[in-house]
Image: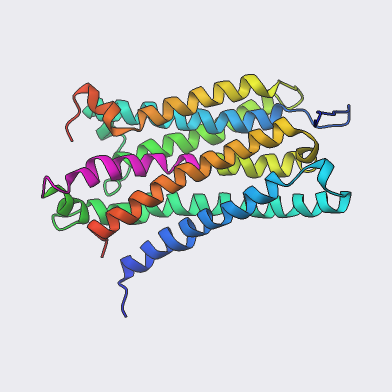
Amino acid sequence: METITRNSSEKPNGPAVAAILAAALAFALLGVVTTLAEVFGGFGAWLAFSGRVGMLSGETTIAIAAYFVSWLGLGLLWRRSDPPLLPVAVVSAVLIAVGLLGTFPPFFRLFGVAE
Amino acid sequence: MHLTYREWWSLVHGFVFGGGFLLSFAGVAIVLYGLRRQDLTDEGIAQHVLWLRLGSAAMAAAAWGTVILGTWVIYPWYRVGSASPKAGLLSSAQTSGWNSFGMEWKQHLAWLAPFLATTVAFLAFYYGPRLARDQRLRRFTLALLVGAFGAASIAALFGALITKMSPVV
């Protein structure tokens, strides 16, 4: 059986955890923003940063910004810390599930959004 | 044989970037799965880590290329205009679901791939050889890689089917 060996010279988990959570956070935010944009027409119209791309332009721009800003912020915050991976995996899975739900058309159509 | 300007860009989006991402997944997954301390010499670990770093970085670049090109270049051609592929799909109840479900889901789900693929590449560069001796970390990285592949595969499948139904020309 394989065992985990770690010595004091190994890098801390913090920067890696920051990268993982940033990806999950960005996708969760994409899901939330997508559903809100579909449900609230005014918000959806505001998200049309590019007229040709429509609200997808704003949704993805916000998600990309959230990804890099949260990665940078969490990375600086946890650059020397060593958080355990398991809770991070659970939180990341929940966040990705939120993103999957929010971007799934049958979900946001539950709120009366027309096809 | 002739391809229009838009078809060339669609080819780059779906075949060069998207296809490259999906194909390279197999190689990166095998390298990562085989990166085990007990099965490799120090030299073997170094070789695996090198290929893992190169492959995962290429996958992340391909994923970003696919979604940026798809969202900002191809998608406007798909949605704008009375004779657009989107308008064509919506003109019939038989085909409208390809837009209202297929395209709506694909255009968002695909963005999970670059986020996860970039994270995998970062983990490969950050941890390197530690992935060979930390089984939990390696499995977690593999799960992220599979997640990126799954999202990209669904998006690619819908992309191919929608293009078959109503191509961007």
| Residue drawn at (41%, 55%) of the image | B69
| Residue drawn at (76%, 43%) of the image | B128
Q: Is residue B38 left or right of residue B124?
A: right
Q: Is residue B96 left or right of residue A94?
A: left
Q: In the image, residue B70 lies at what x, y percent? A: 38, 53
Q: Which residues are magenta?
A: B92-113
Q: Is residue B52 above or below residue A115?
A: below
User: Magenta stretch containing residue B112, yes or no?
Assistant: yes
Q: In the image, residue A113 lies at what x, y percent? A: 20, 28
Decide if residue A30 is in sight here: yes
Task: Name which quarter of the figure residue A18 lies in.
Answer: top right
- The residue most toward the front is A1
**Between residues B10 and A40, which one lies in front from this camera angle?**
B10
The figure's colour scheme reads rainbow
Q: In the image, residue B88 lies at what x, y percent? A: 15, 54
**Between residues B60 and A48, which one lies in front from this camera angle?**
B60
Q: In the image, residue A5 lies at what x, y percent? A: 85, 29
| Residue drawn at (66%, 50%) of the image | B30
User: Magenta stretch containing residue A61, yes or no?
Assistant: no
Q: Is residue B31 left or right of residue A49?
A: right
Q: Is residue B142 left or right of residue A104?
A: right
Magenta-drawn stretch, dominant element (helix, strand or loop): helix
| Residue drawn at (83%, 53%) of the image | B44
- Number of numbered discs on residues: 0
Task: Name which quarter of the figure residue A1 lies in.
Answer: top right
